[in-house]
Amino acid sequence: MKTFRLLAALVLAGVAGSASAQFVNSADNSRAASGVSARSVQTEGWNRIYVSYNKIGYSYDGDGNDYSDDLGFNGFQFGYIKGFSITPRFPLYVEAGIGLQYAFKNMDLGDYKSGEIPRILQDEDKKPQIGLGDNIEQTYKYSLLTLQVPVNLVYKYAFSDRFAIAPFVGIDLKYNLLGKLVLKNEAQNEAGEAKMEDNDIKDSYDANLFDKKDMGSKDATWKRFQIGWHIGLGMDISDFYASISYGTDFTEICKKTKLSNMVISLGYNF
């Protein structure tokens, strides 16, 4: 929430600053002998390629899963954006594009706030095993590959031919292509060694996050399609672009669970 408030304040400051500059610029133009269009209104669109770092939060609205507070992902994304002018009278634009995001998270038992972990480790008969004990070290590895289609409304004010600021708000359409969870277990006794078969627990288990059989229940199974929103502030410096944004999903990734996304992007306009 603090991140959202800070980013919203930056966006509002950007809008206010550009609106003020546009007012002054328009007043100067009205006093000029020849009518020159305001520098802020550029009717041509743009193309952009970009890369970004994504800090993805995991919010579980339920009881008995303290570990979920630590289940945040790091991610990277690359993609393409096309900008279109809406009207020659105002610096309003629509952006649409496509991007591919890879997110990951590695955890061991020490990452959890409590000893409670998802009980999805299974034996050969697909019967859940407790799999939790002082003599068992567990490691979780999540990976997620997502196709994203962002659609933005942009207010872009150009202070010069080489510098512009661009607050924006938009929605994200997401389709999760691949999702995998790998659990690895290493047993230890007082001597520092033990065999996993002595504990009747598999030493590793691979789960498809979108497969009900692998995840153990419908509630724990992740969803393929999501839609979310975001708000952000962009900046053009010559042909280069930088932005920061924050948003959350409207739809749940699984029952009582949503993802948030803070994104820092660098791009090139052409």
Image: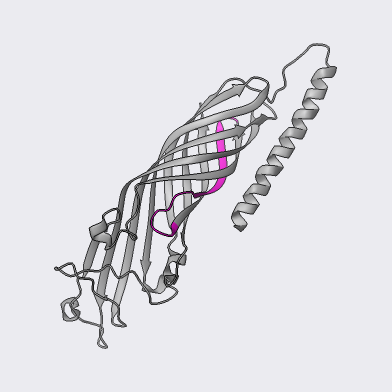
Asked if residue 25 lies left or right of residue 137, the reply is right
- Segment tinted magenta in the rendering: 238-257
Quarter of the rendering containing residue 187: bottom left
Task: Report the residue at 58% width, 44% height from top.
Answer: 231
> Which one is in front, 149 or 166?
149
Q: Total label count?
A: 0
The residue lying furthest to the bottom in this view is 190
Nearer-the-camera pick, 50 or 92: 92
Q: Position of residue 18 (x, y in %)?
A: 72, 34
Q: From what the image shows, is residue 51 above or below residue 22?
A: below
Residue at figure coordinates x 28%, y 82% from the top left:
135
Color style of the picture: one colour
From this view, report whether residue 65 is shown above or below residue 30: below
Residue occupying the point 41% across, 43% down: 174
Magenta stretch: residue 223 in it?
Answer: no
Residue 254 falls within the magenta-colored stretch? yes
x, y percent for residue 81:
48, 32
Q: Is residue 240 above or below residue 186?
A: above
What residue lies at 67% left-to-right and 25% top-to-bottom?
Answer: 90
Question: What is the quadrant of the N terminus in the image?
Answer: bottom right
Q: In the rendered image, which quarter is residue 24 located in?
A: top right
Residue 259: x and y in percent read: 46, 54
Q: Is residue 17 left or right of residue 193?
A: right
Residue found at the far right of this picture: 31
**Is 134 situated left or right of 36 in this image?**
left
Residue 124, position as x, y percentages in the image: 14, 68
Residue lying at the far top of the rendered structure: 34
**Which one is nearer the viewer's eye here, 253 or 161?**
253
Residue 36: quadrant of the picture: top right
